[in-house]
Amino acid sequence: MKELRARLVERISRTPTVESFRFILGEKLDFISGQFLQVIFDEQNRDNKELNKYLSLSSSPGREYIEVTKRLSVSDFSSRLKGLKTNDEVLFKLPMGNCGFKDEYKRIGFLIGGIGITPVISIIEYITRRKLDTDITLVYSNRTEAEIAFKPELDHWQSINKNLKVYYLVSECQPQDKTCIYGTINKDLLAARVCDLKERIFFIFGPPKMVEAMSNLAKDTGCIKGNIKTENFIGY
């Protein structure tokens, strides 16, 4: 784990409320897809939880940049992110986290809601770029179609990776996009769409309540407890 300064080179709007920030580090960084970092805006007070927060890496290892993605709110932390301009420097502490992908995993799944998609993007991009034969099932829930972050990227990766299957769920209104399913992640949906639960390693990222609910659902549906890997987004 290191503390490194990075220079902002690009901002990308993912949804009306979600934005990605791409940075160039001063030196090469090795990390595992699925890991996260700490953004340190208050360098004088490292215990400032309002300005020094953790974000997942949404870029895969081997890129010339690192990327973090955030649903922007009215918080002080979001305001600092919104105020960043090209070439501004930010201090990061990285990499962190033990919930990463390993090349030997042959069948994996994700039960994800909202902004929990960020580390998933790192993992799927890594697998697809490396042309690994890992079989991937992503079940990805959002309230509305407009809130589905990274949908163009996921659709593209599905088109070039025959081992990737994405199920988009929309919970608050009937979706217009025929590739989306109206409803929530539940036992019936998993039983119908993911028939090999016992054979997969499942990753669950998100706020603690979401992680707990999806972990319990996975176990109730037949997933092996030891195959469930979780990472909580605290104070996000």
Image: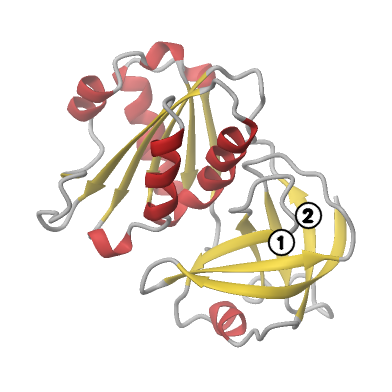
Res. 207 in view: no
Instruction: Residue type at mark 2: give it.
Output: Leu
Q: Residue at x 48, y 18 (%)?
A: 225
Q: Residue at x 40, y 17 (%)?
A: 223
Residue 157 found in image quarter = top left
Front residue of 141 and 87: 87
Is the residue 21 above or below the residue 86 in the image? above
Q: Report the disc number at residue 94.
A: 2
Figure label count: 2
Is the residue 56 above or below the residue 222 in the image? below
Name the spot of residue 101 as percent of width and height, x first. Answer: 63, 31
Q: Residue at x 62, y 75 (%)?
A: 50
The residue carrying mark 1 is: 38
Display coloring: secondary structure
Residue, far left:
174
Query: Badge 2: how crowded within 10 Å, few (<14), some, or many (20+)?
Result: many
Contact (Cβ within 8 Å) of mark 2 with mark 1? yes
Task: Answer left or right for 57 relative to 115.
Answer: right
Front residue of 164 and 2: 164
Instruction: Residue type at mark 1: give it.
Output: Gln
Q: Which of marks 1 and 2 precedes in the sequence?
A: 1
Name the spot of residue 19 as percent of width and height, x first. Answer: 49, 70
Front residue of 131 and 122: 131
Q: Report the disc number at residue 139.
A: none
Name the spot of residue 169 as percent of width and height, x first. Answer: 24, 45
Task: Answer left or right for 90 relative to 54.
Answer: right
Name the spot of residue 97 as percent of width and height, x first. Answer: 69, 43
Res. 18 in view: yes
Q: Residue at x 44, y 11 (%)?
A: 199
What whole-number distance in Å separates the C-alpha atoms at marks 2 and 1?
6 Å
Task: Answer left or right for 108 relative to 222.
Answer: right
